[in-house]
Image: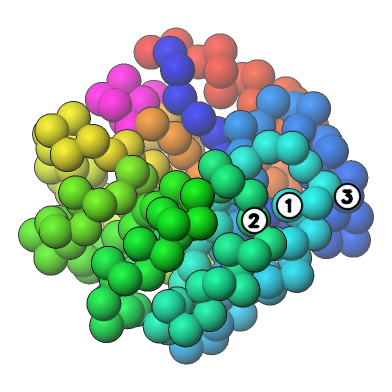
Amino acid sequence: MNFELMASMMCANYGNLEKEVRDLEQAGIDSFHIDIMDGRYVPNFAMSLYDMAYIRSATHLPLDVHLMIEHPNNNIQMFLDHLKKGDTVYIHPEAEYHPSTTLQKIINAGMIPGIAINPGTSVETVMEMLVIVKKVLVMSVNPGNAGQMYLPYVGKKIDKLLAMRKDMDFNIYWDGACSAERIQIYAPKGVKGFVLGTTLLFGKGKPYRQTIQDIREMRF
């Protein structure tokens, strides 16, 4: 079964970030997920512009940049300048007065436009954005911190998006409390990719290669 695995780099060992990137590449990760938090849109600070820029310079793999910041349009060019064509940039529609303007800047820069949907955000409120974006990152936990509890009602939202994805031409990605069980359930349904953090990948005392191999070899 073909699905993507993204490493949540806010969970990585910053004592040797170069080694983390190299080990994850060799383990077979598909892309690096970069969580940028400003302490305002979410109650936490995580990863900076320069963390992102370093990882961009250290890998040939794509980056998935998740902007959890207020009014990303004000500073979006700073991020785009450090990325390369084919990278993904997600914004939260609630964080912007005119999210379509910000998404157009992402498109114009040659990046893949995406939106991130919080657990409390209904599909109906972002319907217009779905015809613009190529990726929808569904948060199964409230954004801002790793290791949070899964919110089970998010599953119904994913099912609703899955029913629309072909007509509106977008792919769905899972972010938050991503366990092997949830990959087994939602990959066959059509979820395209999964962000791996502390639930499954990091801090487990197990080589990344083994974890990723185990996921790839799961029975569906």
The residues colored magenta run 184-191
Q: Position of residue 152 (x, y in %)?
A: 26, 50
* N-term mark: 1 or 3: 3
- Asked which quadrant contains residue 105, the reply is bottom left
**Residue beneath disc 2:** 83
Depth check, mark 1 against mark 2: the one in front is: 2
Q: Position of residue 157 (x, y in %)?
A: 18, 49
Count of marks, rendered view: 3
Query: What amino acid does circle 1 point to?
Result: Arg
**Residue beneath disc 3:** 18
Residue 204 visible in the displayed image: yes
As helix, strand or loop, the secondary structure at mark 3 comes to helix
Residue at the limit of the structure toward the front, as seen here: 108
Left or right of 82 in this view: 86: left
Against 9, residue 97 (above or below) is: below
Quadrant position of the N terminus in the picture: top left
- Asked which quadrant contains residue 186, the reply is top left
Q: Residue at x 47, y 39 (%)?
A: 194
Q: Residue at x 37, y 69 (%)?
A: 102
Q: Residue at x 61, y 74 (%)?
A: 78
